Amino acid sequence: MPTAILLDCSLSMACPVPGVAEGAEEPTRRQLATAALSALFQHVQALYRLEFTALLAFSSRWQLVVPFTRDYNALQEGLASLEECDKTCLEGALAGLSRVVLEEWGVGTPCQVIVVTDGCLGVGRGTLRHSLATLGARTDDEGRFPLPFPFPARLYVMCLATVDELQSIGALESLEKLIELNNGSGQIVAVEGQLLLKNVHNMISKFTQQVYTPFPATLRCGHLASDVTLFPRPEPVTPEHEFDPRPKCISSALEIVGFLELADVSSPPVLSRHLVLPIAPARDSEDGVGGPPEGPEEESSTAASAGKLPSFCVLLHGSLKVEGMVALAQLGTEWYGMLYSQADSKKKSNLMMSVFEPGCDPLPWLQAIPLLGPVTDYKENPYGADDSRSPFPLPPRCKRSYAQNLPVWTKPSGLQADIQKILRNARKLPEKTQTFYKVSSSYRS
């Protein structure tokens, strides 16, 4: 799930924090925000390194500092290069962030938006106070307020202030209204206790544990098992057609219940897709206590040694890729998904898991998944002696017209240049015999 960070660079962020002990240097809220985001980047790089993150800065105008990337060194450099600007105008920043996300990911990809600010609403047109006051009296020329976002999004407002301070300046109610405008999807994050660097780090620690926690699971098939992690983390799902709908969470025990031909499932409707990544076993140290790698050399040696160990996850991935099949997995009570190999490029592929709608029959043409059985239970092979048919009501395999070789359109100038190239090589025969045949065979009649 991509993350877009909006950092407030207004003048109010440059004010020193009051209440610091005598003799100590008074940090500014901007310095605390930089320390908070730096700690956030370090955590994501260590435990959620596949996350795409973008950094935007805003005051009266917004700017894209670092586009969506996995290079957290570039994010740290962009964070350090920002300068103070003028007043806070959040509406324009949210509209700009929406455009950036739409250009990169479209309307179907869920995104996390983190607004880092001191809670000051600003004064004048374009500020949050003015935007909320004129929300119901806007004309077509003024445009709509950028919330809710046109894509699925969670909005986190991270305030470099305490809850009491937000209430005293009248900002808490406006920020809560901001979350409400985003269909209630989001949260206000504030510092607990005095506004000190230690408490800011505690706020980031609690936030990352809530939002950026990996999802460890055990993938099992019979007596074979492998520890894996799912990325991005699966979200709870609330069934829409139940009498008393309650959120359902994916179990950490993923049980493979069977295999199907890839053509039998085709492209089914799914709720979400996740990378399935094997977890390398912890390497024991000399005194028998395992621990994380302490440096790049130890990390590379750990990865190399993990690559030599047998892994059921790697075995499953290779088997599904070679055989062209999918594995049906039970994700919870009456909840299923499928595991399959998806090509990332010509030479690279990944093991993916698609999550179906909760229920025993998420794919109507397969009927109820618990009622499916092995092929050996049938007197005759339901796929036929030569695997030419399917036992499921699927469309017949016919040759599509758009799958044929398409005509290649060319301009007269291009055709003339191709003929001249053949003639040039023909004049130099027999020295250019090899080149002549090579050029001639590259053109189709």
Image (cartoon, rainbow, N blue to C red):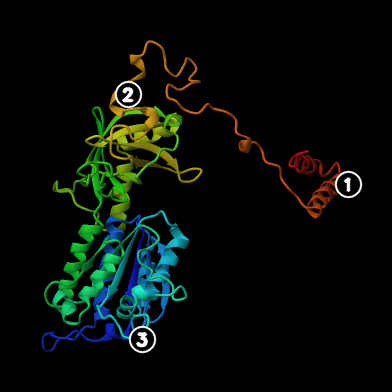
Q: How many marks?
A: 3
Q: Amino acid at mark 1?
A: Arg
Q: Give the farthest residue toward the bottom.
A: 23
Circle 1 SS class: helix
Question: Is the residue 231 above or below the residue 2 in the image?
Answer: above
Q: Earlier in the sequence, mark 1 or mark 2?
A: 2
- The x, y position of residue 161, in whole percent, is 19, 77
> Going by the image, does 267 lie left or right of 7?
right
Q: Residues within 10 Å of mark 2 (few under 14, many from 20)?
A: few
Q: Is residue 156 visible?
A: no
Q: Are marks 2 and 3 in contact (CB under 8 Å)?
A: no
Question: Looking at the rendered structure, which numbered label has been put on residue 372?
Answer: 2
Q: Earlier in the sequence, mark 2 or mark 3?
A: 3
Q: Residues within 10 Å of mark 1 (few under 14, many from 20)?
A: few
Q: Amino acid at mark 2?
A: Leu
Circle 2 SS class: loop
Q: Nearer the viewer, residue 435 or 163?
A: 163
- The x, y position of residue 267, in whole percent, is 44, 38
Q: Nearer the viewer, residue 63 or 395?
A: 395
Q: Amino acid at mark 3?
A: Asp
- The x, y position of residue 385, in whole percent, is 47, 14
The residue at 41%/62% (across/down) is: 69
Q: CA distance from mark 2 to mark 3?
A: 65 Å
Question: Looking at the rendered structure, which numbered label has been put on residue 86?
Answer: 3
Q: Which residue is mark 1?
A: 427
Q: CA distance from mark 1 to mark 2?
A: 69 Å
Q: In which quarter of the view is residue 198 placed?
A: bottom left
Q: CA distance from mark 3 to mark 1?
A: 73 Å
